[in-house]
Amino acid sequence: MINKLADSVAQALAGVKDGATVLIGGFGTAGIPGELIDGLIAQGARDLTVVNNNAGNGDQGLAALLKAGQVRKIICSFPRQADSHVFDALYRSGKLELELVPQGNLAERLRAAGAGIGAFFCPTGYGTELALNPDGSPKETREINGKHYVLEHPIHGDVALIKAEKGDRWGNLTYRMSARNFGPVMATAAKTTIATVHEVVELGALDPEAIVTPGIYVSQVVKIDRTATQAGGFKKSA
Amino acid sequence: MSSYQKRSKEALAKRVAQDIHDGAYVNLGIGQPTLVANHIPEGREVILQSENGILGMGPAPAAGLEDYDLINAGKQPVTLLPGGAYFHHADSFAMMRGGHLDICVLGAFQVSATGDLANWSTGEAGAIPAVGGAMDLAIGAKQTWVMMDLLTKQGASKIVTQCTYPLTGVACVKRIYTDLCTLACTPSGLQLIDLVPGLSLADLEQLVGLPIRPAAA
């Protein structure tokens, strides 16, 4: 019998190794799998490469993971935020490597990894200083039908940590509003995908027409209680 | 130079909104461009896209009704209009790159006469770099419009022969809406669309320091 439901965050994260590339869902604070990040801090894996759109807010969540010194490199599109002081200090002191990637390239490089694409020609960033490899050499470019493109390579994850809304024991997932963001594409791009959900339902209870991430992309599902606000929505989680 | 009145930020937003056609799919950048949403002329239905996976984005919710699972690109709480849809990030940016958005409106540090855009970095030493979706939007939408003050606080033109700040995209800006004028960027340079009352084309050319072809008849 297939049962991807994990008893705890700690159980789900037990296999994360030092040096792993960890894809972390979320945009700003929406869709950030806060409990899994806290679990990763407790688990203690080090020398990590983290992929997230941002680089942490305040002192919680991703910022706390950075502060714990577990991250060697971050790949993201928008590290600078009003409250990104943890990232800012580490970056300025040279303790954290940054690969800055246009947001759409981040998403498409993840998609390419999940879809088995070797590399792809993308118009974004052509003629800019982000069309450079991390070592500063120019990325390969090509003119196709009069338009200029840059060769971009996939970003493969060892593990993806994502936040969904509902899931079942096969790992099928639905999301909630704009908290969906990077979750579905990261789920496809990692060897192991761990998703938190606020509701675990019986097989067949999720409308097959509405499942966003089919269970084939998901390794483990952990249920996390939700914190409701007056709005019926959900508190800003770090 | 003759006396002229600058467009206020609201007047500029209204001027941009006036050119957005009925049925347009539009992405409004963070900051000043978001004001445009408040000025869409009565009777026009315009669908707003947000890079984090929303089409049919509505205004901010009433106080107390914020839901932080539903935010815009600036991470502020928003609402969804009836008919709106959610999708993931790879789809959102495929939508941009694939040329499905009619218009995106962005802020800028500098724009060149031929439409090169610099709006993500001042290249200042020690600054934390951050690009977000700016590069994807700039080259993806059918039309990229810039909305900005014409002059810096020091009085220098932000429309230049060649951008000195790091580029966001090459030859991607079609129009520049400013507090003093509206201009088209073309492969052969700038063309006037309109000016604020009291300002002549000769005055404007002097402020910008570049030749500007008269408005098309």
Image (cartoon, coloured by chain):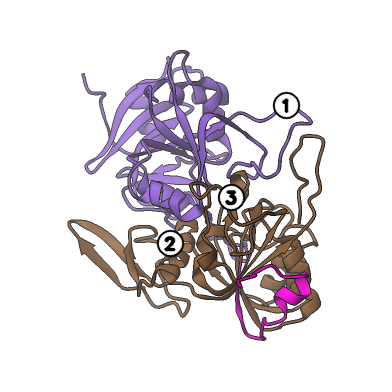
Mark-to-mark CA distance, 2 and 1: 35 Å
Closer to the eye: label 2 or 3: 3
Name the residue nearer the viewer: A102 or B217: A102
Q: Which residues are magenta?
A: A1-23
**Chain appearing in brown on the rendered image:** A
What is the chain identity of the residue bearing mark 2? A
Residue farthest left in this picture: A145
In the rendered image, which residue does mark 1 sit on? Answer: B62
Asked if labels 2 and 3 share a chain, the reply is yes
As drawn, the label of residue A108 is: 2
> Is A56 positioned to the left or the right of B138 in the image?
right
What is the chain identity of the residue bearing mark 3? A
Mark-to-mark CA distance, 3 and 1: 32 Å
Residue appearing at x 72%, y 82% in the figure: A45
Mark-to-mark CA distance, 2 and 3: 27 Å
Counting from the top left corner in percent of width and height, residue A187 is at 54, 65
Identify the secondary structure beneath mark 3: loop
Closer to the eye: label 3 or 1: 3
Counting from the top left corner in percent of width and height, residue A106 is at 49, 63
Identify the secondary structure beneath mark 2: helix
**Chain appearing in purple on the rendered image:** B
Number of numbered callouts drawn: 3
> What amino acid is labelled 3 in the image?
Leu
- A4 part of magenta stretch: yes
Counting from the top left corner in percent of width and height, residue A139 is at 36, 73
